[in-house]
Image (cartoon, grey):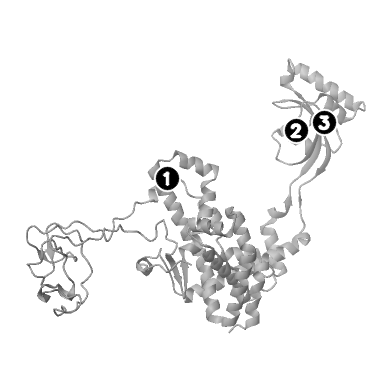
Amino acid sequence: MVCGPVFDRISLISSGKLVARNALRILVGLSLAVAFEHVGPGIIAAVTTMAPPARALAQVPGNYYPPGYDANLPPGYSDPNGVGNNGPAGFPVNTYGPSAPTAPTNPPRPAGWPGAAPNAAAQLPGGALPPPAGVVAPTEAPQPYKDPTEPPYEPAAILAHVGSEVVQASEILPAVHQTLDAYLNSERVAEQLAKAPEDVKEKLLAQWHRELVKRTLDDTIKIKLLIADIKATAPKEGVEKNVAHMRKGFNQAEIKRLKEMYKANSVADLEDKLRQQGGSLESQRMAYVDRNMAVGWAMSQIKEKKEPTHEQMVNYYREHISDWEHPARARWEQLTAQFDKYPSKAEAWRAIAAWGTQIQNGAPFADVARAHSHGFAAEEGGLNDWTTHGSLRSTVIEQAIFGLPVGVLSQILADEEGFHIVRVVEREELRVTPFIEVQPEIKKKLHEGGKIEAIDEYIESLRQRTPVHTIYDEDSPLAARPAAPVR
């Protein structure tokens, strides 16, 4: 049993004093930002049309009534169960399909009882009265089959059972819509959808929506596993205290953030916007409470990882050496005589040679560049700021600025654009930050990485001993369960 004071540490979550941001990412939607990056036209082949309704109701030829019914039923009555023997000619065609087994019935009521027929013998089994003569019993319109795994998702629909916890669609739909809208508003995706036929577009949107709900649900299940563990392990008073603390944090800070995100003018306006996206203010409040409590609980339950050894840090440094490499770079001056500014290349040559002579005779490089050069940095006196090795388009100029001694004026250089003279002002050679300087950073990375790994392992251990059912499981019992009231 975990004592109350340990669990009370969760209250620090809302102010960010306890949990590293990396730990939070494990529990809240790592995949959302990249959920659809792999989706392209090829996914169309995987988008199948909805299966024929399993409970589709078809017209049944002929007139039917159950075995044992009086053959002399009043005209206009049709069998509500869709089973039995062919009835007399002239009966209305039965529009009902096969039904579940008939429930046990009560005996007919005696004549004179309230609701009894004047002639009790004319009553139907169970005491029900037939419709008046000539009136057809009302039929219920056939309802098309709705696959619970396909959008649109009802906000009150239960998407998963995680131990004693449930995940309702209202908890995740606002985040799903926010992510999907951002993806659809990207220029590349919007352009692709604009070119797609309407039927293809609808199938793609449904597929993306379903995939995003599924991914978000997977992340939410991690949170619910921890919440179920909290309720089964922590003292009830500790749980209630932290729930109250988190709800207060939501009201004080999170509502403001949500109003800004949804561009809502008031709390009532925010509620309306959340409802439009399948959520509610209360569902988002509970999701916020669950998320923050789950992260705090996970951090309090994992064993503190040992400090990484010197050997582990050195190995990490060698494996990630490119992270600490600094390519060669240089600051340099340039004069340029563009070919298209002169009648011939010979004229361009004579011009830049004259400029170089002025500099050799003592004229400041910057003054000559401002007066004559056609280069991009002419107005800055020809000075180019730090440039890394391999970043220049002109290989001739790059070889010069990374090969010439600092302060030495180059010969006249030629490339496809014109003639150039360059001079290196300052240069730093390729270097790698020594291990001793990055050791604290490596130590922190390995330590945080160990915590994340430990949280992953802890959540997986909860999954192994906690029943988890989702609507996406094969033969899921959730498909037939009524939805709970949306919160």
Q: Of circles 1 and 2, which is in front?
A: 1
Question: Does residue 215 appear left or right of residue 98 in this picture?
Answer: right
Say which residue label 1 marks: 201
Say which residue label 3 marks: 410
Whether 345 is drawn above or below 432: the answer is: above
Chain-order first, disc 2 or disc 3: 2
Q: Which mark is residue 397?
A: 2
- State the image coordinates of residue 287 (x, y, percent, origin top left): 54, 66
Q: Is residue 460 visible?
A: no
Q: CA distance from mark 3 to mark 1?
A: 60 Å
Question: Does residue 294 appear left or right of residue 442 in this picture?
Answer: left
Whether 43 is drawn above or below 258: the answer is: above
Instruction: Identify the amino acid type marked 3.
Output: Ser
Q: The N terminus is located in which quarter? A: bottom right
- State the image coordinates of residue 188 (x, y, percent, origin top left): 53, 42
- State the image coordinates of residue 481 (x, y, percent, origin top left): 36, 69
Give the SS element for disc 1.
Answer: helix
- State the image coordinates of residue 173 (x, y, percent, origin top left): 49, 59
Q: Would you call the spot at circle 3 few (<14 residues within 10 Å), some (14-19), or many (20 or more)?
A: some
Instruction: Identify the amino acid type marked 2.
Output: Ile
Chain-order first, disc 3 or disc 1: 1
Give the SS element for disc 3.
Answer: loop
Q: Residue at x 17, y 65 (%)?
A: 131
Q: Residue furthest top?
A: 343
Q: Quadrant of residue 129?
A: bottom left
Q: Residue at x 68, y 74 (%)?
A: 306
Q: Quadrant of residue 332?
A: top right
Instruction: Identify the amino acid type marked 1.
Output: Lys
Q: Are marks 1 and 2 in contact (CB under 8 Å)?
A: no
